[in-house]
Image (cartoon, helix red, strand yellow):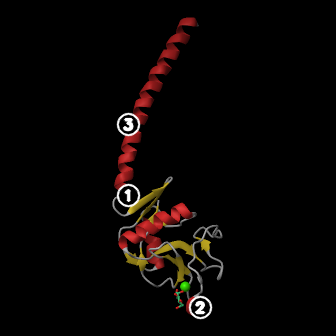
Amino acid sequence: KGDSGLSEVNLLKSKVSALEGQLKALQANFAKYQKVATFPGGRTVGNKVFKTNGYEGNFEDLKQKCVQAGGQLATPRNAAENDAVQKVAALYNKSAFLGITDLKTKGTFKYLNDQPITYSNWLQGEPNNNQGNENCVEIFTNGKWNDRACGEKRLLLCEF
Ligand code: 293
Ligand code: CA
């Protein structure tokens, strides 16, 4: 099995070489589509893409539109993600609704998967549940958060 072992190694070498070429081409093409995805109203943080299309609607409308597109409402889970969402909102000079509410557990804000939030960036004095009717969260163009009535219209900003 000396000879057949060698040719098997050579076969594998050529297959690895072909895969290396395919991977390089795929990486270049992926880099191109990352640019497409983020121009002009998008930002990436790691593998997450945040994107708006400029549409405005109430919370339920925006939530549905993100899911329809294969994503969900933007849900910044750390300062880097919050910065990215802030930059997209600032591009349009509009506040956006986040994927966070206290609709099910009044007073405790949770992600749309019902887990309690582990990162927040509330403006001083927020959340204040103004008029007892603020169960959604808007992010201002400065990146700070405010609880706001879910029926208000805000910028669509999804994550993928
Ligand atoms: C009140 C007091 C304001 C505050 C506002 C928002 C509404 O009107 O200072 O900016 O509530 O919290 O969401
Ligand atoms: Ca508020």
Q: Is residue 119 above or below residue 102?
A: above
Kindly tell me whether residue 34 is visible in this rendering: yes
| Image quarter of residue 126 | bottom right
Identified at 40% across, 33% down, the residue is 22
Marked residue nearer the N-terminal end (1 or 3) = 3
For mark 1, what is the residue? Answer: 38
Mark 2 or 1: the one toward you: 1
Q: Amino acid at mark 2?
A: Gly
For mark 2, what is the residue? Answer: 132
Marked residue nearer the N-terminal end (3 or 2) = 3
Element type at marker 3?
helix
The extreme top residue here reads 2
Residue 55 percent across, percent down from the top left: 36, 73
Element type at marker 2?
helix
Q: Amino acid at mark 3?
A: Ala
Q: Is residue 2 above or below residue 117?
A: above
Kindly tell me whether residue 67 is visible in this rendering: no
Residue 159 percent across, percent down from the top left: 47, 63
Query: In the rendered picture of this protein, how many numbered marks are placed on residues?
Result: 3
Identified at 57% across, 6% down, the residue is 2
Check whether the beta carbons of the residues at disc 1 and disc 3 lie within 8 A of each other: no
For mark 3, what is the residue? Answer: 25
Marked residue nearer the N-terminal end (2 or 1) = 1
Residue 153 placement, left or right of 124: left
Check whether the beta carbons of the residues at disc 3 and disc 2 lie within 8 A of each other: no
Identified at 44% across, 21% down, the residue is 14
Q: Residues within 10 Å of mark 3 (few under 14, many from 20)?
A: few
Q: Residues within 10 Å of mark 2 (few under 14, many from 20)?
A: few
Q: Which mark is residue 54?
A: none
| Image quarter of residue 66 | bottom left
